[in-house]
Image (cartoon, helix red, strand yellow):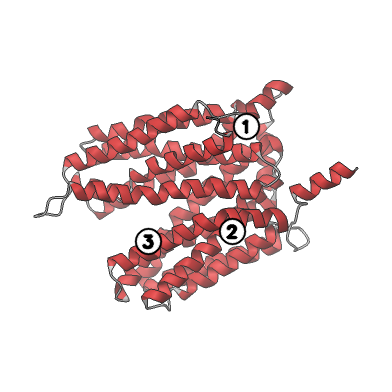
Amino acid sequence: MYISPFKLLCGVGLLAIFSSTISKSPALPLFVSHLGGGPAAVGLIASISAGTGILFSLPAGILSDRIGRKRMLLFSAVVFATAPFLYLVVREIWQLALVRFYHGLATAIFLPVAMAMVTDLFRKGRGEKMGWFSTATLLGRFMAPAMGGFVLAFYTTGQTSSVSGAGFHTLYLICGIAGLAVFLSAFFLPDPKEQCLENTGLRPHWRQGIIELAGNRAIMMTCTVEAAILFAYGIFETFLPAHALMAGLNPYQIGLCLSSQIITIALAKPVMGRFSDRHGRPQQILFGAVAAGICIAFFSLAGSFLALLALSILLGLAISVVTSASAAHIADLSTENAQGSAMGILGAIMDMGHSLGPLLGGLLAASLGLQASFLGACTILIVASILFFYLSHPNGRLNVPPSPQKHQIISGNS
């Protein structure tokens, strides 16, 4: 049975993110406690994989421009296939830290390189295809906590409510099986970038490409908006549970709020990506960022289940409006030989925003209350929107490149 390269890439993405997510949600805090670590150790271990993304997303993108996408995806697949089994021999916190750093390499490499592969495969309809790929990864991210929670609950002792060592072993074996599936599937992925380089006999001038990307204000402002979105998302997922508990919601209702946001993003991204293909990306990015800022601000005022559920859905929709257009917009603005580097820059800046959100939000919550964390996220989003509007074009207007469809129509008629 023939499977198109894009569908195969989406399937690999689903398995990869499932494997990565089940290793940490909800297992990681429980595993740290099982090893004798406290809250500080939980925070440290949880931040390691995000730090890996900040450090290695850009180098991974650069290397994919030089040696080809498939080779880099195969390297990440090796990590996906081997890292889960290292958890089985972990006995100390420092050992877990090393394993988390190694495991973090997998997603740090996979996501920017896979997104660059999508841009290689498609020019027309690029936003929609990126949306479908993102939806596939979100499905993996959504399925993993449910299965992980079920496995750990099965091995939870009734008297102490603690998970036995066998529970963690079973979970990381499942994680490893998914990683092995990623490894085997990766061999069948195409590499259009590598084929292009072999045909031309040329290697891109990657240093010059990085300088051009960093000096492109439209690209950097788009990355800034994306970082602000991840900043707000990090605050949402970290502080919504505590805010909801104070408002009288039960854990089941809190779970519905969190799940509804993920489902909304997964369903809306392909639609919003197609919309950006047809109507332009910059205006969509600006509208979504402002809408997300307004939504996150209203969390500070909401105190009922229905209000928090509605805001969670609206925030998910606003996030999908931005993220379905931002990566495609950066790809449109980048040269063909720097697509991987561009996705690497985006990934690194996104990880920075996602890491800073809970950190700065926690400082605001500790000093001014939980409501201040949501208002802080709103402020960051509005500031990022203003910067995007004024700095993405030297004349103070949005930088609107011609859409791929219009470009092809014009070329075809000439």
- The kind of residue tagged 2 is Val
Q: Residue at x 69, y 30 (%)?
A: 204
* 1 and 2 marks in contact (CB < 8 Å): no
**In which image quadrant can residue 104 be found?**
top left
In the figure, is residue 70 to the left or right of 28? Answer: right
Mark 3 or mark 2, which has the lower sequence index?
3
- Amino acid type at circle 1 is Asp
Which residue carries the number 2 mark?
Answer: 322
Q: Examine the rendered structure and indicate whether residue 237 appears above or below residue 111.
A: below
Q: Give the class, few, some or many, for how many residues have Cα within 10 Å of label 2's Cα (few <14, many ≥20).
A: many
Within the image, what quadrant is residue 201 found in?
Answer: top right
Helix, strand or loop at label 1? It is helix
User: At x 15% / y 54%, what residue is drawn?
Assistant: 161
Left or right placement of residue 21 versus residue 210 in this view:
left
Measure the alpha-carbon separation of dots 1 and 3.
35 Å
Secondary structure state at the residue bearing disc 2: helix
Labelled disc at residue 65: 1
State the residue lying farthest toward the right: 414
Seen in the image, is 97 located left or right of residue 218?
Answer: left
Inter-mark Cα distance, 3 to 2: 21 Å
Estimate how packed mark 1 is, as few (under 14), some (14 to 19) or many (20 or more) residues with alpha carbons within 10 Å: many
| Residue 191 in view | yes
Residue at 80 percent of width and 47 percent of height: 407
**Residue 282 image offset from top left, x and y in percent:** 68, 58
Image height of 251 relative to 139, above or below = below
Pinpoint residue 251: horizontal percent, then vertical percent.
Answer: 28, 66
- Relative horizontal placement of residue 165, taking residue 347 as reference (left or right): left
The span from disc 1 to disc 2 (Cα, nearest Å) is 26 Å
Residue to which mark 3 is pinned? 238
